[in-house]
Amino acid sequence: MKPESEEVRPPTAALPRLANLAGIVAIFCAIAVAGCRSPEEAEEASDTTFTVLYDADERLFGPFWSVEAWFLMFLPLTSWDESGEAIGRLVRSWEHSTDYRTWTFHLRPDVRWHDGVPVTAHDVKWSIELAGNPDVLYDDPWHDVDSIRVRNDTTLTIFYGRPKDARNDWMVYWPRHLLEGLDPAQFYQWDFWTQPVGDGPYRYVRHVPKTMVELEANAEFYAGKPDIDRVVIKFGGENGITELLSGNVDAIAWANPIDVPKLASDPRFRVYHQIGPGIPWLQALFWNVRSPLFADRQVRRALTHAIDRRELLGALNLPEDLRLTDVLFTGRQYHRGELPPPLAFDPEKARAMLREAGWFDGDGDGVRERAGESLSFTALSPPGAAGHAAIYVQAALQKVGVHMEIQNLDMNLLRGRVQNGEFEAAFLPYWNSVDGQIRWLAPGLDSGDGTPQQSRSGGIGYDNPEVARLLASVRETADADQEDSIYRNLAPLIRRDLPITFLYPELTTYIVHRRVRGLESPFRADPIQFLERLWIEE
Amino acid sequence: MLKYITKRLLLSVPLVLGIVTATFFMAHLAPGDPMDMYLEPQRQRQVDLEVIELLRKKYGLDQPIHVQYVTWLKNVAQGDFGESFRHRRPVKDMLVEAVPYTLQLTVLAIILDALIGITIGIISAVKQYSKLDKTVTIGSLIIYAIPSFWLALMLIMVFSVNLGWFPTSQTRSMHYEDLTAIGKMLDRAWHLVLPVFVMGIAGAAGTARYMRNKLLEVLNEEYIMAARARGFREKTVIVKHALRNAMIPIVTIYGMSLPFLLGGATIIETIFAWPGMGRLTVGAVGGRDYPIIMATVMIAAVLTVLGNLLADITYAAVDPRVSYDAPRRR
């Protein structure tokens, strides 16, 4: 074979030329410039537009998770005001039977679907019946409904199988005239959810898949056209802070409290914390009452006295003036502030109570003992803010001679361990509704024969017949005044036994651009849910 | 070759089956209940226990685990991956939406990795011990050592938040629908720059190191000296003689790198809010959404097997000594 008779060149000749590199850089620059909005465009878009980052996709108005977003598009029958009282939305008035099993709702005559068709009682009936369809199995409380009778276009009566405050349902209603021909088996896949026609304060304009959905103010809205003309819900998740800092969005939801100090000190933003609405979740420290360490309520009370819950709120970057308590309560009591104060932070009292209970630090190692057993235990904790709370509590208990180890667990694992009774103490969110209360404090009520639904060895092991009786009576009524009265009777029992130490209410933190006005912590802080009442102030 | 490919594909069936079976039992036997998602504080309403039990029955979670496994296997054999517990949508539909986004990222990252890594590796080898070589060597070591999530966040802070050159996240601009066809294409490319760069650059640093070493090895071989002695141009020696031999192990590395790229995509997709398979899986694992977990694991397993097969086929293409055909009898 004949060798190639080419001239030998230095190896650098094989390298990419600089000119090629410059070309590549130029292409990227062109792409960047093409993608950037001009200042004029940005100005125009920000005028009366509110952009919020939300962890969802274009199906967010569908029957999934984004309860707050629903209320931009669809109306519930009722909602709550800042004092926790029900106010009419789709309905203008209502009445109920004395046993709270029959509710009659009178719809507003001036509410129309966004396509101009009037909203009628038939739409409400059809939606509830659709939710109960076995092919749909919607997760709202349709199953309490026995029957529905439409009296006329604006009046319907709902008959429930048990006493119920029908205003508490998180249900929105859909346009029968557009949906009744669709297959219920395909309910969750209906295209309607990505291009909805609602009756709420904002109407659908368009969406870009996996990117955003755009809404405009509904000029025909019964309560008047909202101030903010245009809403863009941008889809995202963990990228909230960078989206906010780069000016792409006006607000982010579910902000991590750890980021709060940095953003709170930025003059562009304001931090809001939303509680509820309705019955709030509480972050709580569950004691396993079966454990020899916590069988004595004196010990549980002592440990609660050792924790400075106000300081804990500060440590978690939460508002320090939140309402705290040790008792069970109704949502209305919480909103009105009708709560007995929590056990005071008093480490001296905690030490004295532990001594009275027989726990002394005999060997001087900083941990109390009794009959050869040290006051040392393991608390299960999830990641996130509750994990930080656990570290704070660990330090607080150390000061009164109690050693607490922390075992971090995924929330699912943690909940499973607590349900099975396989724990000593645990940090867990507690749902303060009668169902949540019964679940932990009187599980025997959930089965006909009094046997707890979770096994007898599961849960926290608390057993107080009087508490169970009172909780059972809560289930038998839907009268708000009567409920308040029962909870007032429950308060001293729970405060005395303290099977669960309530640390602080669970809050949703929102970071919002200061130009967005009308928000207020803690009952009107959600910029999506209360959007129709907000305005932009440059 | 065809026989070899068929044989490899048939052998991969029990392998994939083994992977998904192990995943199925690990996921289902791990503590935690998928229906617990209805008890999360993020839900402002709580679902009645009666409804939860109906849902549990609907999804077969009340059945013994072996029954659930057989049912799942039967359904998958018919192309049905089930319905997501959380989204209440067919998993197949969700995958059809998510997989192309992940493939976009991983394929472009591999291309970027190859373009940068191989080029830099060649430059380093050809200019061994030069200032350029030393700079590239140190630079690639630093980049290789940087965690991709940190690099992603830093790039976002610099190029998106401070300079505003690139978007912070997502796959498209909000005004995407208003753009022309070319504008749309550029917009998609603009959104790909940072995530693809982060995914590709770490691989490129490794490739560059590997390429440099392999090329130096080959450049010291006798046949290269012989080629030079015969008066071939240096470019010809490097490109036609040395590079082809040095590339053989690199091809294998790319085949093997697919699982790592898919793993990396999970992190990058989360940071850049990229609606791909990785982000879908992260959400599913936290919520014990078994149908999504199983489907994404299965796809990852299949892609990995195919990646390895592709590497072996390419290996034969670039190395004439390798043949998967049966030897001819004389």
Image: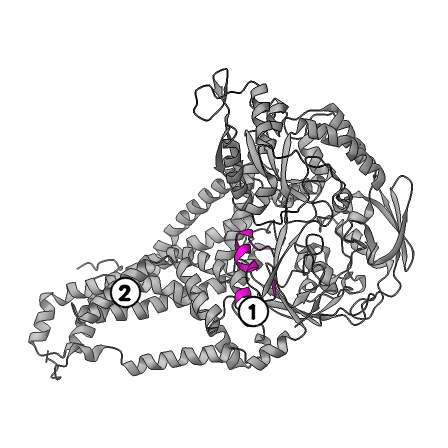
Report x, y in % for residue A278.
74, 47
Report x, y in % for residue A459.
62, 30
Residue lying farthest top? A371
Whether residue B79 appears in this view of the structure is yes
Q: How many numbered discs, if any?
A: 2
**In the picture provided, is A417 more to the left or to the right than A182?**
left
Looking at the image, which is closer to me, A10 or B110?
A10
- Tag 2: residue type? Gly
**Regarding mark 1 in the picture, which secondary structure is present there?**
loop
Q: Would you place residue B239 above or below residue B101 in this image?
A: below
Q: Would you place residue A437 above or below residue A527 in this image?
A: above
> Residue drawn 29% across and 67% down?
B117
- Tag 1: residue type? Asn
Looking at the image, which is closer to me, B142 or A146?
B142
**Residue A188, numbered circle:** none
Q: Label 1 belongs to which residue? A: A248
Could you classify mark 1 by the number of other residues whose Cα lies within 10 Å: few (under 14), some (14-19), or many (20 or more)? some
Residue A217: image quadrant is bottom right
Report x, y in % for residue B5.
34, 58
Q: Chain of mark 1?
A: A
What span is colored magenta in the figure? A243-266
- The reply to whether the C-beta atoms of the residues labelled 2 and 1 are less than 8 Å apart is no
The quarter of the rendered structure image containing the N terminus of chain A is bottom left
Check residue B322 for magenta coloring.
Answer: no
Check residue A249 for magenta coloring.
Answer: yes
Q: How is the image coloured?
A: one colour
The quarter of the rendered structure image containing the C terminus of chain A is bottom right
> Residue drawn 21% across and 65% down?
B212
Q: Label 2 belongs to which residue? A: B139
Whether residue B275 appears in this view of the structure is no
> Residue drawn 43% across and 25% down?
A365
Residue lying farthest right? A151
